Image (cartoon, rainbow, N blue to C red):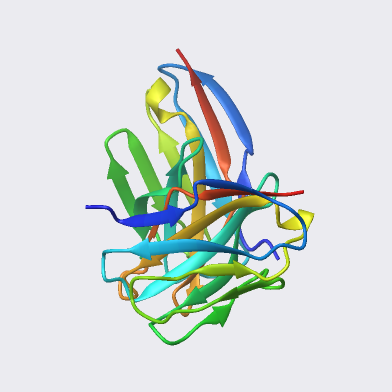
Amino acid sequence: TQLLEQSPQFLSIQEGENLTVYCNSSSVFSSLQWYRQEPGEGPVLLVTVVTGGEVKKLKRLTFQFGDARKDSSLHITAAQPGDTGLYLCAGDYGNNRLAFGKGNQVVVIP
Amino acid sequence: IAGITQAPTSQILAAGRRMTLRCTQDMRHNAMYWYRQDLGLGLRLIHYSNTAGTTGKGEVPDGYSVSRANTDDFPLTLASAVPSQTSVYFCASSDSVRGEQFFGPGTRLTVL
């Protein structure tokens, strides 16, 4: 059962452009995490959002948690080639377990 | 600081053979996890352990077993490997209070 749907699955943009990717669910989560994964490596945590409506910024990355705690978005401003990677969202559904989406593959072309 | 180590890095295995993937963490995290990652299917939880001495089944536990004899180690065993278990396997750990998971570098397993 895929609890989290991420869209778009693949996105290719030019360096300097902005982009937004989405993570949606019909379930409510106590928290939601975003990870970035590069080829041949494990996912690395970027941020955790806990409160409905919460916005967190990490340099050029802005993360927002939906008011109902069912969805989230990641916005990248002035994308750089180093932002290339697979972005995974994960919802905490209790008992220390996470449900992961399939990911947003982002490619930033120099 | 090592974090989480996994061994082996990669392995080619004949179907029917037994295989144990090793995972060790040095962060004294209570909880540990095993995931498999497959193209088009994302990360799926195989087994987890909230604390030493306890384990639980995840989304895709069939064909796999785990043990948690101490805080640091969480081995994953395939009793009799099948080709559908070809995948990249990630071990992770978390401080169960914060819930944020830290991942190892993965083991690429091919079952022929």
Most extreme residue toward the bottom is B53
Residue A24 quadrant = bottom right
The percent coordinates of residue B78 (x first, y second) are: 65, 67
Q: Residue at x 38, y 83 (%)?
A: B52
The percent coordinates of residue A66 (x first, y second) are: 47, 58
In this picture, residue A93 sits left or right of residue A25: left
Most extreme residue toward the left is B1
Q: Nearer the viewer, residue A72 or B63?
A: B63
* Quadrant of the snapshot with the N terminus of chain A: bottom right
Q: Residue at x 47, y 62 (%)?
A: B22
* Quadrant of the snapshot with the C terminus of chain A: top left
Most extreme residue toward the top is A110
Note whether residue A54 is visible: no
Above/below status of B73 relative to B55: above
Q: Nearer the viewer, residue B55 or A63?
A: B55
Note whether residue A74 is visible: yes
Q: Nearer the viewer, residue A39 or A15?
A: A39
Q: Residue at x 47, y 80 (%)?
A: A95
The percent coordinates of residue B3 (x first, y second) are: 30, 56
Q: Residue at x 57, y 35 (%)?
A: A105
Give the number of marks: 0
Q: Nearer the viewer, residue B106 or A69?
A: B106
In this picture, residue A54 sits left or right of residue A109: left
The percent coordinates of residue B41 (x first, y second) are: 69, 51
